[in-house]
Image: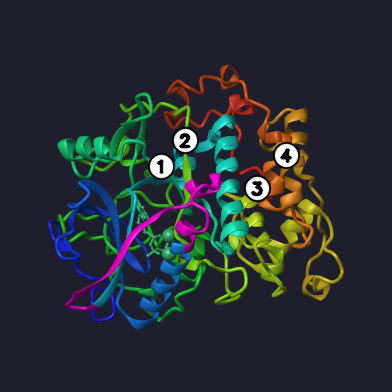
Amino acid sequence: DYCKGGYHPVRIDDTFNEGAYVVVRKLGWGHFSTVWLARDVRKNRHVALKVVKSAPHYTETALDEIKLLQKIVDANPNAPGRKHVVELLDHFYHRGPNGTHVCMVFEVLGENLLSLIKRYNHRGIPAHLVKQIAKQVLMGLDYMHRECGIIHTDLKPENVLVCIDNVEEVVKNELLNDTRSTTTSYKKGHSIRITGSQPLSPPSSGSPSSQKPNNTSEQTKSPQAKENGEQPINGVGTDKNNYDETDGINRDDAESVCDTEMYSSPLTQDKLTNKPSTSTKWTTPDVINVKIADLGNACWVEHHFTNDIQTRQYRSPEVILGSKWGPSADIWSMACMAGSRYNKDDDHIAQITELLGLFPKHLALSELRHIHKLRHWKLADVLQEKYLLSRNEADFMADFLLPMLDLNPDKRSTARQSLQHPWHQIDDDKDNLGGGTSSTHMTGSCDSRDNRTHRTLNSIKQKSD
Ligand code: ATP
Ligand code: MG
Ligand code: MG
């Protein structure tokens, strides 16, 4: 992929935009770009620099992404939801040996929700954080939908990033310690990390360069991920060529989405062996602010670029069935966050039907003809039986989620309506979190006896037997 039309070969200390940005280290990469921590020389701060592949279709997609991001910036600077969507700071072209690359500059953000979920392992993200995250994502969506006329179309935990309060302090600490160890301290001494947890190089084979720019990541799974029915994250974890030419470290042992054991964050990793360390204790942040990121697949409410949208686990029934879709497709994904894994459309629809009941007739009933023996497992029962919420809590949460999972996209609740649900108002008693502010539940132990007090965003995961 480091070839004509592909990635730009970035080196530490490279400068961009006539010396305005100096590269510090790599933050991550995706199928369209590599993303770098860079110093903004003029403003004396750090930024995330996204350098897009140079082939024409990547450039066109990036220019659409910029227009969408500019709308986010301009639509209504005072809207409360705006601060829960990533902010574009600058953009320009950069010429290099592989062509001319669109570059975008963003504020530096932290880890994504999937890694947060994995960090909480089998116990789930504490309830008060789940509420906070759900609320902020809905606020971001409300802003995108109503004020910007934008549909994200690829809402999933990987695309919701945790904010870093004191970026400069964090970067300074990090550079003092070890550029690979992304340990940081923020928010009243609680531990969090910035990105960089993925293998540090894009794949050198199996490149998605032949794909449509607006493809969702399902098509970009490695063969191994496909077999496992695993959720890919930027193709991470299954690439056999995770060799980072910037430091010569083989990243094969780095975290993998397909390998929960190895997914412990760099903070908990032994630096020499790259194996999870048992000595590091985690603390639970009291506050997490999040932002919706990666508008690379987003579109206008009035102008869709493709109907091939959403990553499978978060794909709404109207999209699966090829029916009309709109902003409510994002609401479906929101309610499915960290949902279960599906392999086939039929199976997916079957699971939706099991959970929510029969489809309305007009939604292509013929599509469902090969499905037999469905059981209906009510969401509130799933929350109670599988996630061990009390009857009351389960009923309350189901009452919040079910309107977002209305099979009829026109009747589905909007972000604004969902924000008005009293579920947001009930404060969870943090004392009731079974040590939620201590590190005891972060040791990776599988003991989930105390699960009642730890809810997960996984709440609509269906029965898999
Ligand atoms: P995708 O294949 O997901 O469409 P992409 O090429 O469009 O990838 P992004 O998803 O925008 O690229 O970014 C790639 C990775 O870079 C992210 O997964 C994340 O790890 C990191 N990253 C992106 N933006 C930021 C940011 N603002 N701050 C910190 N890290 C970031
Ligand atoms: Mg992405
Ligand atoms: Mg993208």
Q: Circle 3 is placed at which residue position?
A: 461
> Would you say residue 347 is visible in this rendering?
yes
List the residue tagged with mark 4: 421
Tell me the quarter of the picture where residue 312 sits. Answer: bottom right
Give the x, y percent position of residue 58: 37, 76
Viewer-nearest of labels 4 and 3?
4
Residue at (59% x, 31% y) in the render:
127
The kind of residue tagged 3 is Lys
Find residue 441 and report its horizontal and vertical position in percent: 48, 26
The residue that mark 2 highlights is: 288
Kindly report which numbered mark, 3 or 2, lies closer to the viewer in this rendering: 2
Bounds of the magenta segment: 71-99
Ligand 1 lies under 8 Å from the Cβ of mark 2: no
Q: Do the residues labelled 1 and 2 touch (CB within 8 Å)?
A: yes
Left or right position of 385 against 225: right
Q: Which of marks 4 and 3 is nearer the N terminus?
A: 4
Can residue 269 be seen by looking at this rendering? no
Residue 163: numbered disc: 1
Q: How crowded is mark 3: few (under 14 residues within 10 Å), some or many (20 or more)?
A: many
Mark toward the start of the polypeptide (3 vs 2): 2
Q: Which amino acid does label 4 sit on?
A: His
Q: What is the number of callouts on the image?
A: 4
Label 1 crowd bin: few (<14), some (14–19), many (20+), radius 10 Å: many
Label 4 Cα neighbours within 10 Å, binned few <14 / some 14-19 / many ≥20: some
Residue type, mark 1 in image:
Cys
Which x, y percent locates residue 115? 43, 45
The kind of residue on which mark 2 rests is Ile
